[in-house]
Image: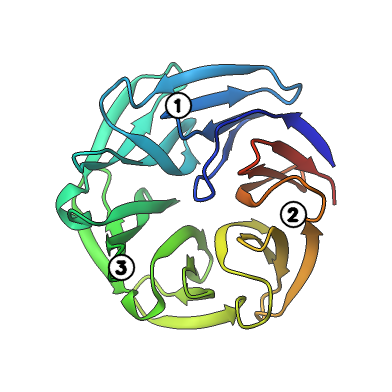
Amino acid sequence: MIAIAQGLNIYTLQGVAIDKQTLIVPTLDGQLLQVTPKGKVTVLVDLLKAELGIPFGITETNGDVVVTVSGYLPVHYLVRVKPNGALTIIADLSKTSGFYGAPFGVAAYNGEYIVTVSTDVVDSTSALLRVSATGKVGAIANLSEFGIPFGVIATQRGFVVAQQNGQLLQISPGGKVAVLVDLLKGGFGIPFNMAARKDDLVVTTNAGLIVRVNPQGVPSLLVDLLKARLGIPSGIVVSNGNLIVTTNAGYLLQINL
């Protein structure tokens, strides 16, 4: 396990992305940080200074990154960021998220974006949305039965969503929802974010764990970062077969498998 960088202001629901060999890390300060494999940190863009908010979910697509952003008014956006830091608002998600909600995860899928949204964090109402490249927003599935949705990834079968109540949900492009696995019931904690590695999923949880889930939905422990005193893992991405993970203790880690 290698600490690429530390001292980063990371919240437990924020993701991480990789563009070529550069890592992109959202922070609670509202910044997107560029981090090289050797740990050099530079600010790509400050979304708070741009009066947009704090970035949470993030995905790389065609050399850009797309992030979900929440402000304080409240305002919520899906934003594209170019490698030079130039910003474009893809969609205003404020109406969809509501006064007490927020967007969290985002994944790129067939030229569109798949976004998890809590429409009310108090009542734990939620949905999975499809956002077109031109900003048109449509619903895929209502996820309120499973609490607030966090991370999302696109797979060959559709989408997998991490839920507040402990489940990983398998959701078809048409909106059919099935439980892949209940990690909380299995003693692994609440899932935050995911990445695909070969045929498996690798998942961060609030118990401080990184968990492997095979295609049949069987989980197994990979790493206990809390026990290693590295904090609770949040964002996760696969690079050259290894894991890149952020934690709420401010670490950006490389975990060699």
Q: Is residue 214 visible?
A: yes
Q: CA distance from mark 1 to mark 3?
A: 26 Å
Q: Earlier in the sequence, mark 2 or mark 3?
A: 3
- Toward the viewer: 62 or 26? 26
Which amino acid lies under the numbered mark 2 shown in the image of this protein? Leu
Q: Position of residue 172 (x, y in %)?
A: 41, 74
From the viewer's side, name the closer residue of 228 and 235: 228
Q: Amino acid at mark 1?
A: Gln
Residue that label 3 marks: 126
Q: Residues within 10 Å of mark 3 (few under 14, many from 20)?
A: many
User: In the image shown, does 162 or 74 lie closer to the viewer?
Assistant: 74
> Which percent across, then down, holds residue 50?
29, 22
Query: Sequence order check: which comes first, mark 1 or mark 3?
Result: 1
Q: Quadrant of residue 121?
A: bottom left
Q: Position of residue 40 (x, y in %)?
A: 68, 17
Residue picked out by circle 1: 31
Where is 145 relative to 58, above or below?
below
Amino acid type, callout 3: Ser
* Distance of label 1 from label 2 (alpha carbons): 25 Å
At 41% across and 64% down in the image, what residue appears?
149
Q: Which residue is mark 2?
A: 226
Q: Which mark is residue 158?
A: none
Q: Nearer the viewer, residue 112 or 218?
A: 218
